Amino acid sequence: MGIDFQIDVSYEMSKFLKTRLEVPIQHFEGFCPFDQGSGTKNGEPACITWTKDRDEARQDFGLDPSDVLIAVKTTRKFHGTRLPVLHTLWASKSSVEVVYLSDDAHQSGPVKTVDLTKLYGIRINQERGHCAKTDAILKYFIKYFEHKSYLVIVDDDTLLSVPNLLKILRSYNHSQPVYLGERYGYGHRSNEPGSSGYDYITMGGGVALSKAAVLKRGHCLRCTCPSPDTPDDMQMGLWMKFLRIPAQHEGGFHQSEPRNFHELYVRHYTPVSFHRFEKSTSTGDIDVAITKKWFAKYLGANAKISSKAKVRQKEPNEMENKVQYASDSNHGDQNSPQVHSAQGSDSSRKDEL
């Protein structure tokens, strides 16, 4: 469709239809977003189509919280600001073991970080990209936590519901290679047979990898970082494409803040994560009160988000599109699992881990 990144398919399709073909969206209430099929309107069925709760169709392969490790990817400059907020919101209450992996060893109260630089002898923290750090995290998991079934990597400003995460993970066979989260795409071209495009899981909302996937990547001699600051999420997507491990999209993982999504969209999936803490408009510092408010509404123990809740459906012209598109970037040979240059990657923003 003339763009390199595929982020929000429904938006991108509607934009293509409107701008390229001059076909506008026609709103029709008969297509219902949730299970309202039993209702009537003027004596006729109110809905032509509707959806069921996706979670009801999930298999349960069994998974204990002790079988999962959550690795928080952080850096020294955020130890005193982001980590206390993250720990208070969800990590301190987590039934899953949480480790804080950084470029500096630090302890403040119950939060203790591990210095990956000393363990692996490289400068893992970069201004952007973070491939070296993610590479070190994968090696750290194999060395110290190979007895666990899943590795989940999140940023130090990721809002996470651990119970909802476990619900998702249990529905996948962890004895097989699993690579899941919010899926993006790069370089897909429908009119180019054999396109070098690939899918990848964006890191901000978190990425879950089964041990089988981590081990398979660890045994891959070609699965390396072209440079320490190569975008880690895109590079991982290339590794997984090379290893023939598909990127599994789970709509409950979100790369952006809750306020950037229409509530009907959020309710369509069980929310697992959101990315970035809210900031004060006056100081630019973390607004802890608002961040806690969003967390409680969507991810907390008493969150009311459900496909059966009543929410007024907005008209299309009321719905704000808040998707942030990454810019074009130059990529090298996609037959090798390496991103040679991806400075436009969503995960390559300066100071965003």
Image: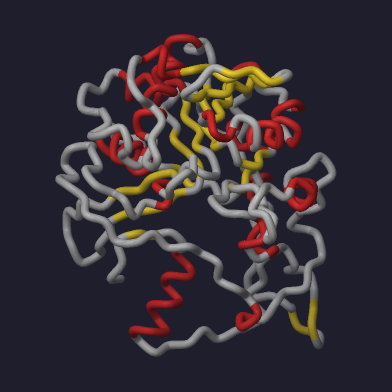
Res. 98 visible in picture: yes
**Residue 54 image offset from top left, x and y in percent:** 63, 50
**Residue 78 image offset from top left, x and y in percent:** 58, 35
**Vertically, is 238 above or below 27?**
above
Name the one closer to the observer, 102 or 27. 102
**Residue 70 image offset from top left, x and y in percent:** 58, 26
Q: Is 121 displayed left or right of 111 in the figure?
A: left
Q: In which quarter of the image is residue 335?
A: top left
**Vertically, is 241 above or below 8?**
above
Q: In which quarter of the image is residue 80?
A: top right
- Residue drawn at x 40%, y 26% is 213
Q: Is 76 displayed left or right of 242 in the figure?
A: right
- Residue drawn at x 65%, y 48% is 277
Residue farthest front in this picture: 283
Name the one closer to the observer, 304 or 228. 228
Q: Is 313 displayed left or right of 241 in the figure?
A: right
